[in-house]
Image (tube, coloured by chain):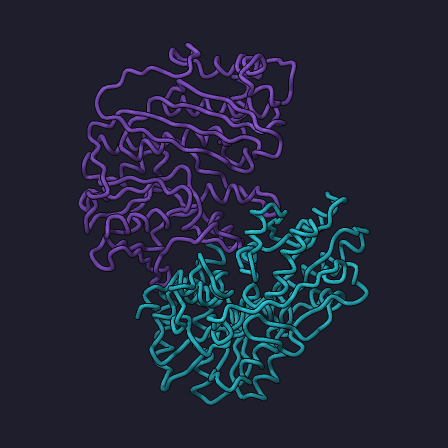
């Protein structure tokens, strides 16, 4: 298939694996930052195919998983108590808030809708002028342009019943936070290709230089991931630390300036809470004051108490790569996709859920 | 169903002139309005000796082993690329009977209609039911119509139940499955679910993907005639998709199942749409597809035979039953890695990226 089967060629995959095996002379730990890459690793059985000396550490890169608990509670409050039409990407619906998930709120009668594009939410607002429509705008830099564009569209068309509940997280500060953590021992990173498609590679050069780590901007298909791993290993073995672009068919060094312009028109950088990890300085986007009318946290009086996470959940350690899902005492026992104790067990991109669904053999080995 | 075929059907069965356009609560009251609704042509459309008696139930003359199945149908939207809820309701129960190794004969047909449904939509569904019954060779012999208040339904829900004699050569039982059996999939995966997804509010995308809804009874009868007890088990991967039915079988029969991803037939557009929305085609619903567990030595011949049938033209052997890893389904990925296939905890939701 055009643009799919080319990147799933078993002959090439074998070649990459052989090159990886031939290149490795010592143990290396590589973190794939993005949940999409974790998904690809486990769905395609890549972890098992890698030599024992290469350990993949699953990073914090599932935006659904790191969306603060308090914000989910706010979304649920808006949907139930304020009667808004709450629109969201699909996999956000099952993430547990402190008492319930959006899916459960929907079952209780809240108007919760799954959309693929935030622009669709603007249309819903236009079609329902007597209702408030809130889009739960989560994601990395990748979804930020479309979310920003929805605000710009609503503003230019004079749509006053539309707002976003924004929880955007930024990748470079998260990589820095992971490296800074004393317990983490990551030798190299696969950066998220789609994030760099928007933002370019510039932010990664100082990280690579300052911390002396190889960073390879990598795609999501199995061959992308394998090639990315090989590129990191080659750098490590040659004692190099630089930014390389595996995903060059899509990512340009400067990224997508038009998309960046749209982001900066609507959002400004702020400190951001990451569920399970804590606050990371300058790691999120807030809606700028000039668009405050489209910021659901300002538009509605939502004051929800911070609720504690489940005491047995070690999602922070999982997302910083300190522990593997099967090293958690609750994994697969009390914590399952049907009864998640924390967010990484919910979204299929979350490290725990990915392990649970796809790699029973790994988890039992 | 193509647009041309649909128009042809509607031309053959034009809607009678009525003094109402919309179905209301009164049409389900059992009184004058109900009779008026049914007299518009429902009975004429589906006419047969048993139904024409207009009794509360049907008396059927059946001897020997019969299979009996029931299913309820709720789909949004009710008209979708490649079919509609009416056709789905007939094919669904017909196929459930066929999976038992039976020859479907009689159906019951019950509607729960939400008031406000347009009569012309109801008519279109009825016409579609008529043609689906003709194709499958089954008769609707009894039925019921209820109307619920606006907001208490989703346009229309349909329940069908069906009975049919067992095919004389059928010997299908989960206990017949044994190590070495080959697993045959009768066609392309995931078309129905993705056709529905392509027209679902908020997730619409342009595509030519059509639902695979179809009656499989003639196709199944064909291979049962030819291969008899070499076919050990049949099942249709509807809700929950291929992954769910195979996992259920592996658990119930306490066998291991090996699958090869690259052998699973899937339409390119469907595969691309799944990638786009972050859905796994293994868990997407199918409505015109079956899985056969068959004796190893006959599997190739069964696939060859299926490929001569329009509904089996993409049939393929996708895996086998193994002694290793009992209760587990393990798929070899396209690049050669291995992945355990499990059941989903709930509805599959489109992923963010």
Residue B18 position in % (x across, y down): 62, 14
Can the viewer see residue A187 in this picture?
no
Figure colour of chain A: cyan
Q: Is residue B12 above or below residue B228?
A: above
Q: In front here: A284 or B68?
A: B68
Q: Is residue A296 left or right of residue B105?
A: right
State the residue in front, B97 or B274.
Answer: B97
Q: Position of residue B270 (x, y in %)?
A: 48, 47
Q: Residue at x 38, y 82 (%)?
A: A23
Q: Is residue B77 left or right of residue A144?
A: left
For this rendering, which residue is in front, A281 or A172? A281
In the depicted structure, whether residue A181 falls above or below residue B177: below
Q: Residue at x 28, y 39 (%)?
A: B234
Query: Residue at coordinates 35% horizontally, 81% vertically from top-left?
Result: A53
Quarter of the picture containing the N terminus of chain A is bottom left
Q: Tell me, yes or no, if residue A308 can be seen here.
A: yes
Percent x, y for residue B4? 53, 27
Q: Is residue B199 left or right of residue A351?
A: right
The colour chain B appears in is: purple
Q: Quadrant of the C terminus of chain A?
A: bottom left
């Amino acid at each position: 298939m055009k643009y799919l089967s080319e990147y799933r060629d078993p002959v090439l995959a074998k070649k990459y694996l052989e090159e990886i095996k031939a290149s490795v002379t010592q143990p290396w730990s590589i973190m794939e930052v993005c949940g999409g890459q974790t998904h690809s690793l486990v769905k395609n059985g890549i972890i098992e195919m890698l030599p024992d000396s290469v350990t993949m550490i699953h990073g914090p890169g599932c935006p659904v998983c790191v969306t603060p608990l308090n914000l989910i509670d706010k979304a649920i409050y808006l949907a139930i108590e304020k009667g808004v039409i709450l629109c969201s990407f699909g996999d956000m619906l099952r993430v547990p808030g402190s008492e319930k998930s959006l899916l459960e709120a929907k079952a209780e009668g809240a108007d919760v809708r799954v959309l693929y594009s935030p622009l669709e939410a603007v249309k819903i607002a236009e079609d329902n002028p007597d209702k408030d429509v809130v889009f739960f705008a989560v994601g990395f830099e990748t979804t930020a342009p479309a979310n920003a564009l929805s605000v710009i569209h609503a503003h230019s068309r004079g749509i006053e019943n539309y707002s976003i509940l924004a929880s955007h997280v930024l990748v470079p500060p998260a990589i820095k936070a992971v490296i800074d953590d004393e317990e983490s021992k990551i030798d190299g990173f696969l950066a998220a290709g789609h994030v760099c498609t928007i933002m370019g590679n510039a932010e990664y050069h100082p990280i690579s230089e300052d911390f002396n780590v190889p960073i390879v901007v990598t795609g999501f298909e199995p061959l992308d991931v394998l090639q990315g791993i090989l590129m990191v290993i080659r750098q490590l073995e040659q004692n190099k630390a630089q930014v390389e672009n595996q995903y060059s068919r899509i990512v340009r060094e400067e990224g997508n300036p038009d998309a960046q312009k749209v982001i900066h028109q609507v959002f400004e950088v702020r400190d951001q809470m990451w569920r399970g990890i804590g606050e990371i300085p300058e790691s999120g986007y807030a809606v700028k004051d000039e668009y405050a009318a489209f910021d659901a946290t300002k538009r509605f009086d939502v004051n929800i108490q911070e609720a504690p996470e489940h005491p047995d959940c070690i999602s922070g350690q999982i997302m910083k790569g300190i522990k593997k899902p099967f090293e958690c005492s609750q994994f697969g026992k009390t914590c399952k996709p049907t009864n998640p104790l924390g967010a990484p067990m919910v979204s299929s991109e979350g490290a725990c859920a990915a392990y649970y669904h796809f790699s029973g053999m790994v988890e039992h080995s | 169903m193509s647009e041309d075929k649909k128009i042809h059907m509607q031309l053959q069965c034009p809607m009678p002139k009525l003094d109402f356009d919309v179905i209301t609560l009164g049409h389900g009251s059992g009184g004058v309005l109900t009779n008026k609704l049914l007299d518009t042509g429902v009975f004429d459309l589906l006419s047969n000796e048993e139904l024409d008696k207009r009794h509360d139930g049907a008396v059927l003359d059946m001897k020997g082993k019969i299979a009996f199945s029931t299913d309820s149908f709720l789909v949004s939207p009710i008209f979708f690329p490649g079919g509609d809820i009416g056709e789905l309701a007939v094919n669904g129960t017909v196929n459930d009977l066929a999976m038992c190794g039976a020859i479907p004969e009689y159906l019951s047909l019950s509607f729960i209609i939400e008031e406000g449904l347009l009569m012309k939509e109801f008519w279109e569904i009825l016409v579609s039911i008529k043609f689906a019954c003709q194709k499958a060779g089954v008769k609707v012999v009894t039925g019921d119509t209820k109307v619920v208040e606006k907001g208490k339904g989703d346009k229309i829900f349909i329940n069908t139940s069906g009975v049919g004699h067992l095919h004389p050569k059928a010997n299908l039982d989960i206990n017949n499955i044994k190590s070495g059996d080959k697993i045959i999939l009768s066609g392309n995966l995931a078309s129905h679910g993705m056709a529905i997804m392509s027209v679902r509010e908020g997730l619409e995308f342009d595509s030519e993907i059509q639902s695979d809804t179809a009656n499989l009874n003639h196709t199944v009868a064909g291979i049962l005639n030819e291969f008899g007890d070499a076919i050990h088990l049949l099942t249709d991967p509807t809700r929950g998709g291929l992954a769910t039915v195979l996992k259920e079988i592996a658990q119930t029969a306490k066998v291991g199942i090996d699958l090869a991803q690259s052998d699973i037939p899937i339409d390119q557009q469907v595969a691309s749409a799944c990638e786009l929305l972050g859905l796994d085609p293994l868990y997407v619903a199918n409505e015109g597809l079956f899985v056969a567990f068959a004796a190893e030595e006959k599997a190739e011949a069964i696939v060859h035979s299926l490929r001569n049938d329009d509904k089996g033209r993409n049939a393929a052997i996708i895996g086998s039953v193994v002694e290793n890893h009992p209760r587990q389904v393990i798929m070899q990925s396209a690049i050669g890695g291995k992945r355990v296939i499990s059941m989903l905890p709930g509805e599959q939701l489109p992923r963010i990226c």
